[in-house]
Amino acid sequence: MVRILLHGCGGAMGRAVTDIVNGTDGVEIVAGVDLKQNGESGYPVYGSLSDVTEEADVIVDFAAAPAVDGLLRFAEAKAIPLVLCTTGLSEAQLARVRECAGRVAILRSANMSLGVNLLLKLVQDAAKVLAASGFDMEIVEKHHNRKLDAPSGTALALADSLNEAMDGAYHYVYDRHDRHEKRDPKEIGISAVRGGSIVGEHDVIFAGADEVVTISHTAYSRAIFAKGAVEAAVFLAGKGAGLYSMADVIASQS
């Protein structure tokens, strides 16, 4: 039995993870941490990590960026592997994640779904053919009106995948309203849309002369992210120190 400590259990993603775990054999949530408690969770919920007394094999985090600093200190001190799903981290926080991964297992992914992680590979293959032939590359992401960070972590991961395929020759442009100049052939445009209850949509657009190729992913519910996070938790429990990704989870299942 894999014992999970759920950090950010009171949010929408925390509740989705709880639902997935309740329907999955071999895993259980032994405790949750959140400043708010929304309804009956079926496990004890604490307002602070320092109050947790239950033993856990792995932490699953769906909280907020400001809480990540304390979470990393806790995981490191307790030597508990961490599935880090919170996005919008600063460069300093990302550096701290890499540092902590030298002492405890951390799995970090901008997106926990199987489809998006396949998309990261598909866009690389497309870029090597299309961008190399002069196609412009643009990313458009859409999310609900409560999402705090923009662009999304997934959009940035997609941009990084494209850039990696092109040997890092591109730079990112996030806003064009004050730009009065021709588009740079070596830029990747990233646009964010916020509205309604959109769970998550990502379009990677390759625009060439007289033709456009678009590779898209649409999330219809948060369950796909929760399922991926639980699979990541099962994978990470018992792992040695290091920085892991969903690609490692997918490889272990093939």
Image (tube, rainbow, N blue to C red):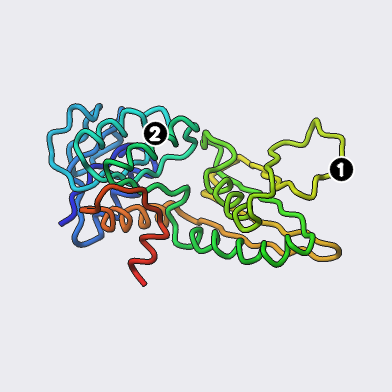
- In this rendering, position of residue 109 left or right of residue 237: right
Return the residue at label 1. Answer: 182
Residue shown at 24%/38% (left/top)? 32
Q: Nearer the viewer, mark 1 or mark 2?
A: 2
Mark 1 or mark 2: which comes first in sequence?
2
Residue 204 at what x, y percent from top left?
Answer: 65, 56
Amino acid type assigned to the residue bearing label 1 in the image: Lys
Residue shown at 24%/51% (left/top)? 240
Q: Which mark is residue 96?
A: 2
Name, please, the residue furthest toward the bottom. 254
Q: How many marks?
A: 2
- In this rendering, position of residue 236 left or right of residue 149: left
Residue 225 at what x, y percent from top left?
Answer: 41, 53
Residue shown at 20%/56% (left/top)? 27
Residue 114 at what x, y percent from top left?
Answer: 44, 62
Q: For label 2, count other residues whose C-alpha is less than 10 Å away and answer few (under 14), some (14-19) or many (20+).
A: some
**Residue 250, quarter of the rendered image:** bottom left
Amino acid type assigned to the residue bearing label 2 in the image: Arg
